[in-house]
Image: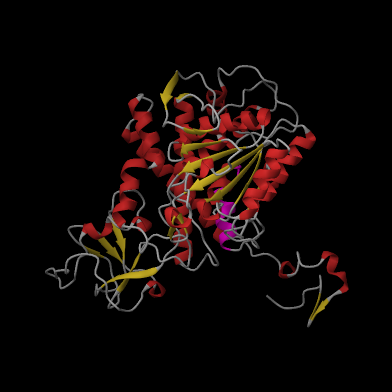
């Protein structure tokens, strides 16, 4: 960060000495580093600047056993800009991760969270890295919010040594202990009791921080969660339990899995609050309120109502499109070849009316089909579809994870409706334009810059090395314990790689 930009980010803040060892959220930390270690700073949101302060009315809250915070949220142009950049970077990372998976550079399970960017972005706007956080396996965005980089996420997905977990954790196990992020848990709900334990540690140390434990609606019925509620309430722990309710546990709608899907009330004696998890300012306001409540009165449940656009590719819908090996231009879109491993054979299941053949003998795909394929789009407007020479081409649809059928449990209209009416990034763009902080041209320029940054970091990650061979047993035995693995001796790799 240049010093001019750093001064702009920090200008006009009120005084609060920066204690030795305090870790700040990424934009502020970068500004402090650019200017040097001295100075005073208020840790509030992503930025505290000389910009004109504005008050925005966020989405309403629904309380349980408490008085909710005000809907009037103070923000500024700088904060809104940082939120837009952060969420755009997160989404580009998720879309790029999807492409890494489809190209077989990323392996194993992959759970994407595009659509849910407002939760990690809004939460970090109200927290410091002294607050603890632990999550389920949908971790990419939370890791980035805790100070992680695109390169670290991409490298981990590709099994590289420079990844968030040295290349041995994968998508579900990203950690950043130095910023009190205790990572992704692969077992549904297992992180919730651990989150209560983190809250106990904060209470024991009396450090003025709280723990935030994130889990999904699919885990909300597990017994261990209610045990964590009970002990947190008994001991008045500074614990905030955050339910990321994207309305589908795997492929099961919440109403089919829970007799009472009002998850913010499920703690009974533990107060709770419903929050619009697609409104980043509502998330910020609720998180600040929840931290204060937890420190003063004990545990709290926050239900973040959100929506995931997709998980990973799944083969369920097909359309017959014979194509040559070269790109074709049609009146609607441009068709490009892709690797053959993405092609699936019939049975056929057309997504639209029968396709007509154009003058060149090729069958163009109507743009109406693309409107149902958010997985492949760089933004909400369909312009490009990627195809391959074959008798039929797989149409990729949205889902929970690698094993998810995608659109068999929800309609394409539902997905598009969410994109058009509740998208968190579009909401911030609207605020920036309404309050004259930016225009469409400037926003497009920034989006283009972020797209390039993300692409560059991923390309760098592709060039990084894999972990050394001894990492195969690095976390299995402490110091090897004298064990041997034919023809290897622990700690002495002899297999050429």
**Residue 170, position as x, y percentages in the image:** 60, 61
Side of 216 where 293 appears, left or right: right
**Stretch in magenta:** 146-158
Q: Residue at x 71, y 67 (%)?
A: 468
The N terminus - image quarter = top right
Report whether residue 388 is seen.
Answer: no
> In which quarter of the view is residue 196 placed?
top right
Q: Residue at x 68, y 35 (%)?
A: 238
| Front residue (pair 365, 462) | 365
| Front residue (pair 323, 472) | 472
Q: Residue furthest right?
A: 482
Side of 311 where 27 appears, left or right: right
Q: Residue at x 62, y 28 (%)?
A: 292
Q: Is residue 217 above or below residue 42?
A: below
**Residue 81, position as x, y percentages in the image:** 45, 32
Q: Is residue 149 magenta?
A: yes
């Amino acid at each position: 960060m240049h010093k001019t930009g750093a001064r702009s980010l920090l200008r006009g803040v009120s005084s609060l000495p920066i204690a030795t060892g305090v870790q700040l959220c990424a934009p502020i930390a970068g500004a402090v580093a650019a200017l040097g270690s001295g100075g005073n700073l208020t840790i509030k949101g992503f930025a505290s600047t000389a910009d004109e302060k504005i008050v925005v009315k966020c989405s309403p809250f629904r309380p349980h056993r408490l008085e909710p915070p005000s809907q009037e949220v103070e923000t500024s142009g700088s904060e809104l800009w940082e939120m837009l950049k952060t969420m755009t970077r997160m989404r580009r990372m998720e879309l790029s991760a999807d492409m890494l998976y489809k190209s077989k550079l990323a392996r194993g399970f992959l759970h994407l969270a595009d659509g849910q960017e407002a939760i990690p972005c809004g939460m970090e706007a109200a927290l410091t890295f002294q607050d603890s956080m632990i999550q389920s396996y949908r971790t990419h965005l939370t890791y980035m919010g805790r100070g992680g980089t695109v390169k670290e996420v991409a490298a981990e997905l590709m099994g590289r040594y420079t990844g968030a977990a040295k290349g041995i954790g994968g998508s579900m196990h990203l950690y950043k202990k130095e910023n009190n992020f205790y990572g992704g848990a692969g077992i549904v709900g297992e992180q919730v009791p651990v989150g209560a334990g983190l809250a106990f540690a904060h209470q024991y140390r009396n450090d003025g921080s709280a723990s935030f434990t994130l889990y999904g609606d699919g885990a909300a019925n597990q017994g261990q969660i209610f045990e964590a509620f009970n002990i947190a309430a008994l001991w008045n722990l500074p614990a905030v339990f955050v339910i990321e309710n994207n309305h589908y546990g795997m492929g099961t709608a919440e109403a089919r899995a829970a007799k009472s899907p009002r998850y913010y009330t499920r703690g009974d004696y533990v107060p709770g609050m419903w929050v619009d998890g697609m409104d980043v300012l509502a998330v910020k306001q609720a998180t600040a309120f929840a931290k204060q409540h937890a420190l003063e009165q004990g545990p709290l449940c926050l239900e973040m109502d959100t929506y995931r656009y997709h998980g990973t590719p799944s083969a369920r819908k097909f359309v017959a499109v014979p194509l040559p090996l070269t790109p074709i231009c049609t009146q609607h879109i441009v068709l490009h070849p892709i690797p053959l491993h993405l092609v699936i054979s019939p049975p056929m299941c057309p997504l639209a009316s029968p396709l007509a053949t154009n003058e060149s003998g090729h069958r163009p795909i109507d743009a109406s089909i693309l409107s149902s394929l958010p997985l492949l789009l760089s933004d909400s407007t369909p312009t490009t579809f990627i195809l391959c020479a074959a008798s039929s081409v797989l149409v990729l649809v949205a889902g929970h994870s690698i094993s998810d059928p995608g659109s068999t449990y929800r309609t394409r209209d539902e997905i598009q409706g969410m994109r058009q009416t509740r998208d968190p990034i579009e909401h911030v763009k609207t605020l920036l334009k309404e309050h004259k902080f930016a225009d469409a041209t400037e926003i497009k320029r920034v989006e283009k810059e972020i797209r390039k940054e993300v692409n560059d970091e991923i390309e760098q990650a592709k060039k990084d090395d894999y972990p050394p061979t001894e990492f195969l047993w690095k976390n299995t035995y402490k110091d090897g314990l004298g064990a041997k693995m034919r023809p290897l001796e622990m700690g002495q790799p002899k297999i050429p790689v």
